[in-house]
Image (spheres, rainbow, N blue to C red):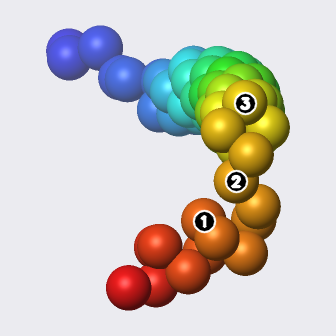
Amino acid sequence: MARKANYEEKISAIEAKIEKKQNELKALKSQLNDLKAKKADGDYKDLTDYMLANNISAEEVLAKIKN
């Protein structure tokens, strides 16, 4: 006679794997958001440093961008 598959066990195992991968994905997304925030802070600092070094106001920058 053919062996009967234990579907409940297999379903539980797959659900556990899915949950683990979802948790890993959440952690990766959090790391990504942290890195993007750090990059944005660095870019903003570079921009403000450049503006200060060249005596450029925010209004002047916005005027150049809009044209």
Kindly identify the residue that appears in the image at 46 percent across and 73 percent down. 65
**Mark closer to the chain start, 1 or 3:** 3
Helix, strand or loop at label 2? It is loop
4 over 47 or under it: above or below: above
Q: Position of residue 40 (x, y in %)?
A: 68, 37
Give the residue at x 20% y 17%.
2
Q: Nearer the viewer, mark 2 or mark 1?
A: 2
Q: Position of residue 54 (x, y in %)?
A: 66, 38
- Residue holding disc 1: 61
Which of the image's four quarters has the N terminus?
top left
- Real-space CA distance between mark 1 and mark 3, rounded to the nearest whole angstrom: 14 Å
> Spatial distance from mark 2 to mark 1, Cα to Cα?
7 Å
**Which residue extends farthest front?**
55
Outermost residue, left side: 1
The type of residue carrying mark 3 is Ala
Q: Are marks 2 and 1 in contact (CB under 8 Å)?
A: yes
In x, y percent, where is residue 17?
Answer: 56, 21
In the rendered structure, the answer to whether residue 13 lies left or right of residue 59 reads left
Check residue 53 in the rendering and tell me which mark sits there, or answer none.
3
Q: Earlier in the sequence, mark 2 or mark 1?
A: 2
Inter-mark Cα distance, 3 to 2: 8 Å
Residue 10 at least partly seen: yes
The residue that mark 2 highlights is 56
29 versus 9 height, above or below: below
- Dot 3: what SS? helix
Along the viewing direction, whichever of 21 and 38 lies nearer the viewer: 38
Label 1 amino acid? Answer: Val
- As drawn, the residue found furthest toward the bottom would be 67
Give coordinates of residue 23: x percent, y percent.
71, 27
